Amino acid sequence: MNLLPAALAGGFVGTLVLTTVLRGATELHLTRMDLPFLLGTAVTGHRTRAKAVGYALHFVVGLVFALAYWALFLVLGRHDWWLGTLFGLGHGLFSGTVLVNVLLPLVHPRMGTPMSDSSSVALLEPPGFLGRNYGPQTAWVGLVAHLLYGTIVAAFLTAAG
């Protein structure tokens, strides 16, 4: 059975939940991180457009990660919810350590880096390890959101096959 549509549907719903959890945490002052805004400002300096572009980019990235999950599930020959949760943990750790801590500041034209000095003007603070520059709760919020994402992708695959 072809589970690709289920993986993409799970990726969409998982990204919707992940993004909602992150947005809710921002509104509840658990974190200052606005991931879609960070992504969008890598493309445009226009603040309003940056949010729209960032949300679109975040959903595309969520679908790409769902395809990676699907491939891993295919290799393993199973797609249990707990395995999806475990993938979500790895995904969250990868996102918080490599993606937003190392890669995003390297390619983001409006973000400071640890190498920024007083002669450069950065409009955005780099997130730091697990996003902790945006508040001490950011790490936990991000990990919980990614655990939910992984569980949801696996649940969609389980329901479909």
Image (cartoon, rainbow, N blue to C red):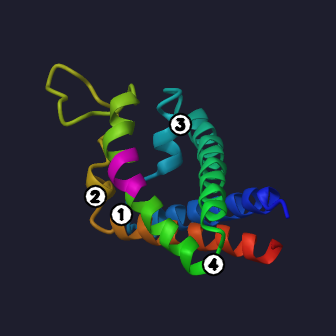
Q: Nearer the viewer, mark 1 or mark 4?
A: 4
Residue 124 visible at all: no
**Residue 82: image x %, image y %?**
55, 80
Kindly identify the residue that appears in the image at 71 percent across and 58 percent down. Answer: 12
What is the secondary structure assignment of the residue under circle 2?
A: helix
- Position of 70 compared to 119: left or right? right
Judge whether residue 95 is colored magenta. Answer: yes
Q: Quadrant of residue 108?
A: top left
Kindly identify the residue that appears in the image at 65 percent across and 49 percent down. Answer: 59
The residue segment tinted magenta is 94-99
Q: CA distance from mark 2 to mark 4?
A: 31 Å
Q: Earlier in the sequence, mark 1 or mark 2?
A: 2
Label placed on residue 40: 3
Q: Is residue 21 above or below residue 36?
A: below
Q: Amino acid at mark 4?
A: Asp
Mark 4 packing: few (<14 Cα in 10 Å), some, or many (20+)? some
Q: Earlier in the sequence, mark 1 or mark 4?
A: 4
Q: Amino acid at mark 2?
A: Arg
Q: CA distance from mark 1 to mark 4?
A: 28 Å
Please give the residue where the numbered disc 1 appears in the rendered image: 138
Label placed on residue 119: none
**Residue 46: image x %, image y %?**
53, 28
Please give the residue where the numbered disc 4 appears in the rendered image: 80
Q: Amino acid at mark 3?
A: Gly
Kindly identify the residue that appears in the image at 48 percent across and 33 percent down. Answer: 41
